[in-house]
Amino acid sequence: MVKTSTPPPFLLSYALTRRCNLRCKHCYSDASETFAPDELSTEEAATLIEELAKWGIRLLILDGGEPLCRDDFFEIVGFASSRGLRVVVGSNGTLIDESAALKMRKVGVQAVAISIDGAKPETHDAFRGEEGSFMKAMEGVKACRKAGLPFQFNTVIRRSTLNEIPAILKMAVDSGATAAEFFDLIQVRRVKERCVEDILTVNERRQVMNWLAEAQSSCPILIRVPACPMYPLILKEKNISPTDLPASHLHRIPYYQRGCAAGMPSGYLTILPNGDLIPCMLLQTRLGNVRKDKLAEVWDNSPTLHKLRSRSLLKGVCGRCIHREVCAGCRGRAYEESGDLLAPDPGCWLRGDEVEC
């Protein structure tokens, strides 16, 4: 195992390709209809996975673009599984039929996250850029369930569909999902160009997070909320105790008692299709490239990562907040809206008596 002075990330996300069969308004990967010419080859992907295994990575997310667009997708998954990595896949679900679901399970996929961005076909399809994508995604859900392949719903929270969140959560439960993950929309480049009006106001964010926390009390599956480290604070403040889940399962929620995980010890790291390293898909500042840099060396020596890990450097309200060490705000939102990864999180509602001056 590769030795580093900083514990390696628990979770690493590798975007296999920029190619995608949909045209989503928000895409954090800025996906397109074609493969990018500089994507890692099958051999380079295998070399990378070997390095991850030796480094001690425990959980690998393979996403894109749409990962199933790669002809070598099953080969890459099989190799990663053979090297002891727990592999999960992020997909739009439209290319998953029963045969694909069975093959994913056979080569070692442990779970699939399927994007469902509306309770109705028209809202999902409008956001995903293709008519009929909702029905195809739901067919993918059914295929996973029939194949015995665990799956969860992934949903982007946006202003135009706030009223559909209860129905989406119910759909996840009724469909047999193991979890529902609601992503707070972040202003990356494509969002700014195509759907900036869908970003929540601070008050809307507070309200929906309160609703999700209350819903967790009686929801039989886990509700997770990436891009909002303030959410676990509500769970603790309200003393949420799920009736149908062990209370310890709440510790599996992103950021719970840890705060923003981007580039943190035992946290999170992202690899883009061309091998570029970034702290998080929502924090798109380049750290290096796996074609020329050793992952462990970047992890130990990157000045950007050192800044992220020194929460005493956080500025403004985030720097003074009593929750600084267990929240830190979303560094991706802070960076995308200010250009400064240490700036206060502009989406946070914690103010006044929530900070020590």
Image (tube, rainbow, N blue to C red):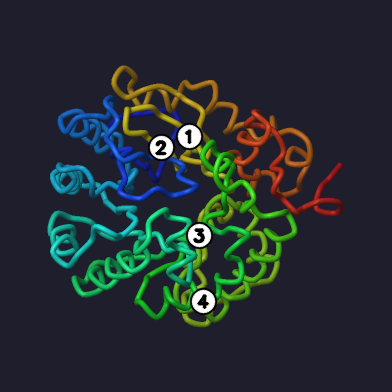
Q: Residue at x 45, y 45 (%)?
A: 27
| Dot in front, 3 or 4 | 4
- In-image side of 262 versus 11 (left or right): right
Q: CA distance from mark 2 to mark 3?
A: 19 Å
- Dot 1 or dot 4: first in sequence order is 4
Q: CA distance from mark 3 to mark 4?
A: 21 Å
| Dot in front, 1 or 3 | 1
Amino acid on which disc 1 is placed: Pro
Considering every residue shown, the one lying at the far top of the view is 292
Q: Which residue is mark 2?
A: 270
- In-image side of 42 versus 305 (left or right): left
Amino acid on which disc 2 is placed: Thr
- Dot 2 or dot 3: first in sequence order is 3
Q: CA distance from mark 2 to mark 4?
A: 31 Å
Give how far across and how far down residue 124 sits, in percent.
Answer: 45, 63
Q: Given contact means CB atoms under 8 Å apart, are the residues at marks 2 and 1 in contact? A: yes
- Dot 2 or dot 1: first in sequence order is 2
Q: Which residue is mark 3?
A: 253
Q: CA distance from mark 1 to mark 4?
A: 33 Å
Q: Residue at x 30, y 54 (%)?
A: 88
Give how far across and how far down residue 347 sits, in percent.
Answer: 69, 48
Secondary structure under tag 3 reads: loop
Q: Which residue is mark 1?
A: 279
Amino acid on which disc 3 is placed: Ile
Query: Which one is nearer the viewer's eye here, 293 or 247?
Result: 293
Q: Which residue is mark 4?
A: 167
Q: Given contact means CB atoms under 8 Å apart, are the residues at marks 2 and 3 in contact? A: no
Q: Given contact means CB atoms under 8 Å apart, are the residues at marks 1 and 3 in contact? A: no
